[in-house]
Image (cartoon, rainbow, N blue to C red):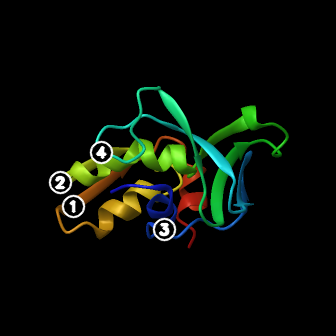
Amino acid sequence: QLDAATLTSWPYNRPDGALEGTLNVAAVEYPPGAVFSVPHVDKTDLQTEAPERDVELPLSSTVCKLWDSNFEDEEDMWMSDDLSERLSMFNNARACHGDVLVGGLGLGLVHQWLARSPAVTSLTVVERSPEVVPLALPA
């Protein structure tokens, strides 16, 4: 069963706060009780008839966000690893097996899950923005 506690506890080494070109990555702490809107996904306990629903965090969680510029506006955000993002990847990541090709590195979340999956025999990630690589995969 998939719930907010499971989503926030999946193994994942978040990138450290860093700056690369015009991109900034930062960790944002959310306390227990913080609310996230998440999409409807079949076969989870988050299922509902509505296209989205609010889920309250049962415990504190760190969310990594990548912005273009100086964190001035949420509109500048390229990506994050919040509950909505994790949930949108969950069923696809769980279904992957064999040789897997991922378009986009993102913050490294899905490739780390896939690398740990015994069903995945090889993993190739294609990223078109070179400045994302050192942010998501620090040396």
Disc number for residue 122: 1
The three-letter code of the residue at mark 4 reads Asn
Question: Image quarter for residue 10?
Answer: bottom left
**Residues marked 4 and 3 touching at CB (< 8 Å):** no
**Residues marked 2 and 1 touching at CB (< 8 Å):** yes
- Which residue bears the numbered disc 2? 99
The three-letter code of the residue at mark 1 reads Ser
Label located before the other in sequence (2 or 4)? 4
Measure how far apart labels 1 and 4 are at the Cα level.
16 Å
Label located before the other in sequence (4 or 3)? 3
Secondary structure at badge 4 equals: helix
Q: Nearer the viewer, residue 111 or 87?
A: 87
Count of numbered circles on the image? 4
The residue located at (52%, 70%) in the rendering is: 13
Q: Mark 2 or mark 4, which is nearer to you?
A: 4
The residue located at (30%, 69%) in the rendering is: 116
